[in-house]
Image (tube, rainbow, N blue to C red):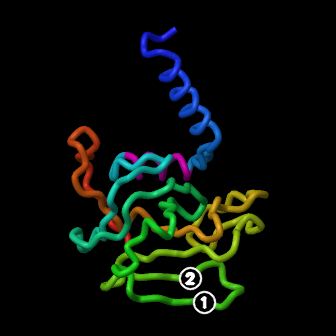
Amino acid sequence: ISSDGPEALMATASAVESVEATPSTADSWNRLRDKERVEGELGLAESGGPNELFDASEPSRLIARGYRRVVFGDHGPYLELEPSQVVWENLPEVILKPAHAYYDEYYSYKGFVRLYKQKRSVAHKRNPPAGGVRQNRSAGYADYKVGMCYISPDCLTVQGLPAAQRSNEPRRWKR
């Protein structure tokens, strides 16, 4: 028995159950590669966190306060956010698509950051759009949830990372 008492043991067990309840989406070579890059370059955990996320092209512009998790799909990694975590006034350009579309799009002032607000599941889509890795998955190419928001980590930066989490590798920019 731990000297911290039963309360600490219960809290630890609860945290372990929570982590186990959400399996990793990094389950193939392309997703593991993306996970290494997201964790190494931004220091972001797959399980989510309270990190403030900024527009990488304009690092003073706050885009989100925290994120739920990182979804590693066959079309690349995306940070999943609750709509309440998004700083909507910093994404003023909006493209609302018809009901049959899979998402609506929101852009930052200069268009560097693109947020997708998921409208439909892709669970029936075995492969991603062009540019992704074709894995022919029966459960769909990514675990996107209807109502959640998604942003590629390639267009974000995290300010104030502890020195131990900063990578000495230069960021790879993507437009």
Residue hosting label 1: 97
Residue toward you, 167 or 69: 69
In percent of width and height, residue 169 lies at: 26, 49
Q: Which residues are magenta?
A: 30-39
- The dot on residue 104 is 2
Residue at image position (42%, 70%) is 86
96 horizontally vs 44: left or right: right
Is-magenta flag for residue 35?
Answer: yes
- The dot on residue 173 is none
**For mark 1, does the 10 Å Cα neighbourhood hold few (<14), some (14 to 19), or many (20 or more) residues?**
few
Q: Which secondary structure type mostly characterizes the magenta part of the structure?
A: helix
The secondary element bearing badge 2 is classed as strand
Residue at image position (57%, 65%) is 75
The part of the image, by quadrant, that contains residue 162 is top left
Q: Are marks 2 and 1 in contact (CB under 8 Å)?
A: yes
Q: Is residue 105 above or below residue 61?
A: below
In percent of width and height, residue 83 lies at: 50, 70
Q: Is residue 44 above or below residue 9?
A: below
Q: CA distance from mark 2 to mark 1?
A: 6 Å
User: Of the residues under marks 2 and 1, which one precedes in the sequence?
Assistant: 1
Is-magenta flag for residue 139?
Answer: no
The secondary element bearing badge 1 is classed as loop
In percent of width and height, residue 164 lies at: 25, 38
